[in-house]
Amino acid sequence: MSNLRWRLDGQLALVTGASAGIGLATARELLSLGCDVLLAARDADTLEAARDELTDQFPERLIEGFAADVSIDEERRALLDWVEDQGEGLHILVNAVGATLIGETLELGEDEWRDVFETSLFSAFELCRYAQPLLAGHPATSIVNVGAVSGLASIRGATVEGMAKAALHQMTRSLAAEWAEAGIRVNAVAPWAILTPRTAAALADTDHYEQVLARTPLQRIGEPEEVAAAIAFLCLPAASYITGECIAVDGGFGRFGF
């Protein structure tokens, strides 16, 4: 019986940003724990390739995909209508979509920084709101938002991302308190340097790579699977008394002093 605390059999998850990086790794981790997974991503071809890959690995699980740009409200609503049509409600929502914008604050264009907020913050806020009735239909459900260490500490050139992620972390805390009565736990993770398609170019720069390692006590770049493991843990029955938390998956970056 105790092993059931570490399983997600019979549960249904929606993972956004699921075609690559942390989102794809999270979908794979949830599937390995017995969960059925609905995948959402912007690019239909990449999403279909991800679905095919996961279906080959987990043929016994329900795995469906829906192409949507969640920074656009009309597409967010269409996505949640599709989820509702599955007829099972929802047990888990993972908001893994995000946007990166690196640059000097005074040089950023308005369209650029507004896109970061739409993609990294407002999409998660609205998806949480739209998914709430589906999650509340089950006695114990969870939301995990993928934040970033830039929302916890100043990262050079990441002012806008930091603003959006800090707001995402606060949203997590607020919704955790507001929706606890409905049986919905809300948590977040805050990754540091993780090797994904979005970070590969920056980490390929030798100087940048060495500077990252110099600030990371574990002296290496993280893998998407390491973030996915933290996300999956927060969804498990074993984490049933954890809500409103933000777990840094950062190799010790946030605890590094002199």
Image: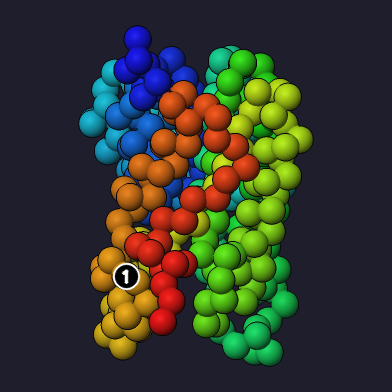
Which image quarter is the C terminus in?
bottom left
Question: Would you say residue 120 is visible in this rendering?
Answer: yes
Asked which secondary structure carries label 1, the reply is: loop
**Which residue occupies the extreme right position in the image?**
178
Q: Quadrant of residue 198?
A: bottom left
Figure check: 31 above or below 205: above
Q: Residue furthest left?
A: 57
Residue 78: % across, % down: 66, 36
Who's the residue at 59% across and 65% down the image?
151
Residue 61 in the image: x percent, y percent? 34, 21
**Image position of 109 (left or right of 209):** right
Residue carrying label 1 = 217
Camera-side residue: 45 or 11?
11
Residue at (46, 56) in percent of width and height: 248
Residue at horizontal 64%, vertical 73%?
A: 160
Position of 168 compared to 37: left or right? right
Q: Position of residue 100 (x, y in %)?
A: 53, 69
Q: Nearer the viewer, residue 94 or 210?
A: 210
Residues 80 and 222: in front is 222
- Kind of residue at disc 1: Pro
For this orientation, the residue located farthest to the top is 1
- 218 displayed left or right of 183: left
Q: Residues within 10 Å of mark 1 (few under 14, many from 20)?
A: some
Name above or below for residue 43 compared with residue 184.
below
Q: Residue 215's spot in the image, x, y percent? A: 37, 77
Identify the image quadrant of the N terminus.
top left
Residue at 41%, 56% in the rendered image: 249
